[in-house]
Image (cartoon, helix red, strand yellow):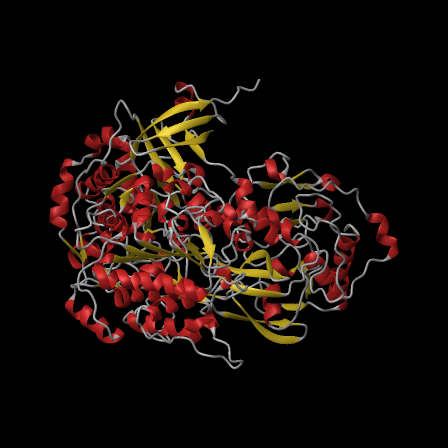
């Protein structure tokens, strides 16, 4: 059993099949028996879901009781005498299995539908460990149960299969009505799509109001597929026998939640993904994690190095309108491509100096790749001009957190909302961006926690919220200072916490006096009494937790927004305890780890400033190379420097970009693409010919996440190990190998590889790179050795020794500042850089959506994800749609002062009037052609979340009728 028991729980002695054994207090008979080696069939029970006891396959005898008891939902009692394998118990268990098996369709999935890969029936193999009917076949085989001829007449009329959903197939002829899918959907994921209808022989599983699965409100998390014990619900890629060639444990490559997964591999292809019982997800996944895996097998994968043809100019128009790649590039050998890539970079450095080069690393790769990449830039290029996507998502959060609490990491894991009485979610849409994290919030609401959703858009989490604060875009500081005003002036502060653990409170107190709720209500759009009510509830709750996303950070006042959140938590003492803390939700799978590893221009690994003489000296000695002692340029600044005059000594002339796509992710894309095209030499290392790669001189084919072994660090500060499941296609190579090849050609004698017993290079030295990074991080992950990761898969830092279990909650006694105290920083209202006017009267908000991620390079090439959301849309309030003469489903042109795009209109009344929302994953309508490159002065993050636009009808959809 994978369920984790409380090791501190008291034990209970009882008798099991004549033996004296013990159980933990509250443990079920089924779980206790399993621990003691007694296997009991079960179908309606599975780890992670509430025990229901309705299948009766797990019944056992209990002395003194007349009827058999379901062991899955009966807790062990002191002195209880249980017979799990008695003749009576086994006879009853086997009868249930036989009756259920008798109703199964004989040939399993007999569908001939073009939407199902390999849809023809597949006979069960003799050595198939699970068989045609999943767990039912497994338990029947273990118990020696076969269906007697007399029971064949029990077969019911079989319902028609439902293959309407792009990802999942429904075959209710195999349904045993165990309700695991219902509990998975309604109680674990809290989506409320699957229900149970009818009575008696008419009882059945339904989706919404008996809709087809494809037409229902299903969000395709696949929790029901994972829960189903018989194959009545299955991924379309894994219909039939469940036998696979191998299963490989890894970590989801998408958002920062860090769900642990298992790749199911057959014939050297991933055919499905299962959720593992990891600490961040406990088996849960979302649509991207479960069904977004086949991008690795896309025919668009890069498989050979490419070199730009002589005389072919770099045309930014190719980022939108592609031609045959053979018109732009030619294939090359690795030797030629690497020599040209590194040779030209070295030549530019020799001619123009170290500042002429820059590097963008990736938050989508491993910690080891991030560490080695930043080391290459610092020691090989000779400057600190290295950055990655954290600059575009949470740089302002990190700036404020480092300033205030001395650490850029979260104080509590997401799952700590379990212990929170009040959960403030601000500037985040977790049901779309962090869906598994959202399940913990919804679970908390089901248990009685109060969720406060503060966001200009009313998103899906609002259905579970106690209060919704749809404040005006860019009015964060006004709203938060109003709540601080209430906390300060109504005596709701934690006096002891402020006295013992905080500095600068008096300045903060004086600053918020001008921000009464009554004065701020017209500015932020939230009634004064509501602001007071929420402030009081947050301050007086036993435990309150704040979680935020890029809606807080991506503003010119993003750092001030987070300063206010730090002040709220500190003034009320809502930090450093279970259920009380601060959590900026990380957007990419390794944005936390890449930052920890030093992939930022002003910090060495573990946030040691490059201009700190002690840190600078230590790293010069550690790496054995002279280092620049001045911070480098950030992402947006590098783009500006690429367009600098030729006489600028800091003009950037050459770049090495690994796994990033600034031609889609940067603000004001026309400017960014012009900058990339103006470089004298651009090397791009990626798995696809991305928008950025079209502007490269050399393109190096890299490895996708399932093709590598390495660690990543999630939003909860968990260092997690992913193992290689596949071999890179064609001549594509591991990213660590490519970085080392570039380094050697830049004059660095790096030798991280070692040979295994068969004489092959082992992971290109990933364990050696990890060990060096561990030492470079000065103790933060000292106790997380490579061997420990291989054993445990996930360890939370800080972890100071190998005996240290890790510290999920930090700041409990002191903050990692110079004096151990939090520094409170007052904030005032700073208006958005660009306000609406008569020419551009609306506000653009950008973000992600459930089915796609980041710039779409991976998810747009994942079959299921692209089928679910195939086209770019602009979401607008229904009243705005009507007033502008638009129709849902029609086409609109959205324009800013920097560019314009055309998209399909989608009605969303949660989007406030006067605003539009556009996802930024679509090349054909890139939202960042519109966005403003104005920077937060502290975090140097662009103002993605606010710019002025106008909307015009292009092709109104016909009104149906």
In the displayed structure, 772 sits above or below 125; it is below
The residue furthest front is: 311
In the displayed structure, 853 sits above or below 728; it is above
Give the position of the C terminus as an image quadrant.
Answer: top right
Q: Position of residue 283 (x, y in %)?
A: 52, 57
Q: Position of residue 745 (x, y in %)?
A: 34, 69
Would you say residue 383 is visible in this rendering?
A: no
Left or right of 642 on screen, residue 128 = right
Left or right of 243 on screen, residue 327 = left
The residue furthest right is: 150
Left or right of 656 on screen, residue 140 = right
Residue under the image location 27 percent in, 71 percent down? 778
Residue under the image location 70 percent in, 41 percent down? 203
Q: Position of residue 730 (x, y in %)?
A: 54, 61
In the displayed structure, 770 sits above or below 258; it is below
Residue under the image location 39 percent in, 48 percent down? 312
Taking depth in this image into account, of 133 and 642 the one nearest to the observer is 642
Q: Position of residue 575 (x, y in %)?
A: 28, 55
- The quadrant in which residue 99 appears is bottom right
Give the position of the N terminus as an image quadrant.
Answer: bottom right
| Tag count | 0
The residue furthest bottom is: 757
In the displayed structure, 428 sits above or below 456; it is below
- The quadrant in which residue 472 appears is top left
């Amino acid at each position: 059993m994978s369920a984790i028991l409380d090791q501190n729980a008291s034990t209970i002695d009882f008798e099991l099949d004549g033996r004296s054994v013990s159980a933990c207090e509250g443990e079920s008979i089924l779980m206790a028996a399993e621990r003691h080696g007694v296997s009991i069939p079960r179908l309606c029970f599975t780890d992670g879901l509430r025990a229901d006891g309705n299948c009766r396959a797990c019944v056992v005898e209990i002395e003194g009781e007349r009827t058999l008891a379901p062991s899955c939902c009966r807790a062990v009692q002191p002195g209880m005498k249980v017979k799990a394998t008695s003749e009576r118990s086994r006879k009853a268990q086997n009868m249930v299995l036989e009756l259920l098996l008798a109703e199964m369709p004989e040939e399993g999935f007999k569908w001939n539908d073009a939407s199902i890969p390999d849809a023809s029936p597949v006979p069960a193999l003799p050595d198939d460990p699970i068989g045609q009917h999943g767990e039912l076949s497994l338990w029947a085989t273990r118990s020696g149960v076969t269906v007697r001829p007399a029971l064949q007449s029990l077969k019911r009329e079989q319902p028609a299969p439902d293959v309407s959903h792009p990802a999942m197939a429904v075959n209710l002829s195999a349904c045993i009505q165990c309700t695991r899918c219902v509990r998975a959907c309604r109680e674990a994921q809290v989506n409320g799509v699957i229900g149970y209808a009818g009575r008696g022989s008419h009882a059945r599983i339904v989706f919404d109001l008996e809709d087809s699965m494809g037409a229902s409100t299903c969000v395709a998390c696949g929790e029901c597929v994972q829960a189903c014990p018989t194959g009545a619900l299955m991924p379309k890629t894994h219909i039939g026998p469940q036998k696979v060639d191998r299963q490989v444990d890894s970590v989801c490559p998408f958002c920062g939640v860090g769900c642990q997964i298992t790749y199911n591999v057959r014939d050297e292809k991933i055919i499905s993904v299962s959720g593992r019982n990891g600490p961040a997800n406990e088996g849960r996944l979302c649509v991207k994690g479960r069904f977004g895996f086949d991008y690795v097998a896309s025919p668009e994968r890069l498989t050979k190095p490419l070199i730009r043809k002589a005389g072919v100019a770099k045309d930014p128009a190719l980022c939108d309108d592609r031609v045959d790649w053979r018109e732009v590039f030619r294939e090359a050998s690795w030797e030629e491509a690497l020599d040209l890539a590194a040779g030209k970079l070295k030549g530019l450095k020799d001619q123009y100096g170290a500042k002429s080069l820059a590097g963008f690393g990736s938050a989508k790769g491993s910690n080891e790749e991030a560490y080695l990449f930043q080391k290459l830039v610092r020691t090989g290029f000779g400057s600190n001009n290295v950055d990655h996507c954290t600059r575009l998502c949470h740089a302002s959060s990190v700036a404020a957190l480092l300033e205030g609490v001395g650490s850029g990491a979260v104080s509590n894991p997401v799952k700590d909302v379990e212990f929170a009485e009040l959960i403030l979610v601000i500037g985040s849409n977790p049901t779309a961006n962090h869906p598994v994290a959202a399940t913990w919030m919804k679970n908390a609401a089901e248990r009685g926690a109060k969720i406060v959703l503060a966001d200009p858009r009313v998103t899906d989490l609002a259905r579970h919220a106690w209060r919704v604060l749809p404040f005006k875009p860019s009015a964060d500081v006004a709203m938060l200072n109003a709540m601080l005003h209430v906390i300060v002036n109504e005596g709701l502060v934690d006096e002891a916490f402020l006295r013992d653990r905080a500095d600068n409170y008096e300045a903060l107190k004086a600053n918020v006096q001008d921000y009464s709720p009554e004065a701020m209500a017209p500015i932020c759009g939230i009634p004064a009494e509501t602001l007071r009510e929420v402030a009081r509830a947050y301050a007086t709750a036993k435990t309150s937790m704040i979680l935020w996303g890029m809606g807080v950070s991506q503003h010119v006042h993003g750092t001030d927004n987070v300063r206010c959140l730090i002040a709220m938590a500190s003034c009320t003492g809502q930090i450093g305890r279970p259920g009380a803390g601060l959590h900026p939700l990380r957007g990419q799978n390794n944005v936390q780890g890449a930052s920890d590893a030093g992939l930022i221009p002003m910090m060495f690994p573990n946030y040691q400033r490059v201009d700190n003489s002690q840190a600078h000296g230590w790293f010069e000695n550690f790496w054995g190379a002279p280092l620049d002692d001045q911070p480098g340029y950030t992402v947006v600044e590098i783009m500006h420097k690429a367009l600098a005059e030729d006489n600028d000594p800091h003009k950037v002339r050459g770049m090495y970009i690994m796994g990033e796509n600034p031609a889609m992710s940067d603000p004001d894309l026309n400017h960014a693409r012009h900058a990339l095209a103006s470089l004298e030499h651009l090397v791009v290392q990626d798995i696809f010919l991305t928008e950025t790669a079209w502007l490269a001189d050399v393109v190096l084919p890299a490895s996708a996440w399932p093709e590598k072994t390495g660690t990543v660090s999630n939003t909860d500060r968990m260092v997690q190990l992913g193992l290689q499941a596949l071999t890179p296609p064609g001549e594509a190579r591991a990213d660590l190998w490519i970085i080392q090849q570039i380094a050697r050609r830049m004059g660095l004698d790096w030798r991280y590889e070692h040979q295994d017993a068969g004489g092959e290079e082992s992971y290109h030295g990933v364990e050696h790179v990890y060990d060096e990074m561990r030492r470079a991080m000065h103790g933060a992950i000292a106790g997380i050795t490579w061997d420990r990761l291989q054993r445990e898969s996930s360890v939370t830092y800080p972890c100071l020794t190998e005996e240290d279990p890790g510290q999920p909650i930090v700041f409990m006694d002191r903050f990692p500042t110079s004096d151990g105290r939090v520094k409170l920083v007052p904030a005032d209202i700073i208006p958005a850089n660009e306000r609406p006017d008569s020419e551009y009267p609306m506000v653009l908000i950008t973000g992600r959506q459930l089915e796609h991620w980041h710039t779409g390079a991976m998810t747009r090439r994942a079959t299921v994800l692209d089928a679910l959301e195939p086209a770019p849309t602009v979401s607008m309030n229904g009243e705005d749609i009507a007033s502008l003469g638009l129709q849902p489903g029609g086409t609109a042109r959205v324009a800013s002062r920097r560019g314009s795009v055309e998209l399909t209109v989608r009605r969303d009344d949660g989007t406030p009037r006067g605003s539009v929302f556009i996802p930024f994953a679509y090349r054909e309508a890139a939202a960042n052609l519109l966005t403003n490159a104005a920077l937060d002065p502290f975090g140097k993050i662009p103002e993605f979340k606010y710019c002025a636009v106008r909307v015009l009808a292009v092709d109104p959809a016909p009104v149906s009728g």
